[in-house]
Image: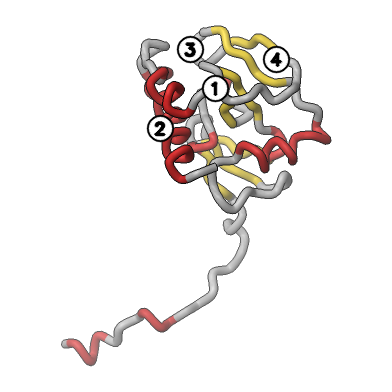
Amino acid sequence: MHDDKIMDKINAYMAIHQRLGSKGNGDFSAFAEKIGVEEKLGYPLIKAKGPVGEAIEIYDIPQEEKEKVLRQIYPFQPVPSMDEVMFDIHEEKTFTVKDFIVMRDHDLNFLVSPYFCSSGGSVLDWISRKNDNEEEEDDDSDIVDLKTIC
């Protein structure tokens, strides 16, 4: 994805949040128009109830195909592993990346958390828990000795 397309896609994700925050009245058709129609992923679409009660469509992606889909539509680098644990800031719960959902809306594919239908968290709302249990390296190179300043 080119940088301009990535920014347009991120803006479309932001518009989803605006729409959810305004109980379905937000409009992101301008961003969808900039991005253009994204190809459907080639998996069946299932109707579901979204976070504000609206009808949404989500893909029924077989587990063995999910890593390929993640690599295809994840908007940032690096792409997380399927076993990575993320924290959804809307739901305030953790989940494993392999449990993600892809939603189809306005001819675009959106990567969302498994809690999307209850709280509306998209990929923009994922915080990695990868380093939570790892010790940070102690690098004292940026510490200033106050005795030399005072």
Camera-nearest label, 3 or 4: 4
Q: Earlier in the sequence, mark 4 or mark 1?
A: 1
Residue type at mark 1? Val
Camera-nearest label, 1 or 2: 1
- Asked if residue 16 shows in the view, the reply is no
Residue type at mark 3? Val
Tell whether label 3 touches label 1 (CB within 8 Å): no
Q: CA distance from mark 3 to mark 2?
A: 20 Å
User: Measured from the top left, where is residue 144 in percent x and y?
Assistant: 30, 83
Q: Earlier in the sequence, mark 1 or mark 2?
A: 2
Q: Is residue 30 above or below residue 142?
A: above
In front of the other: 81 or 148 = 81
The residue that label 2 is drawn on is 11
Checking the image for residue 52, the label placed there is 3
User: Measured from the top left, where is residue 150 in percent x and y?
Assistant: 16, 87
Q: Residue 56 sits in which quadrant?
A: top right
Q: Is residue 11 above or below residue 87?
A: above
Q: Earlier in the sequence, mark 1 or mark 3?
A: 1
Camera-nearest label, 3 or 2: 2
Identify the residue at horizontal 59%, vertical 53% (top origin): 78
Callout 1 secondary element: loop
Callout 4 secondary element: strand
The residue that label 1 is drawn on is 37
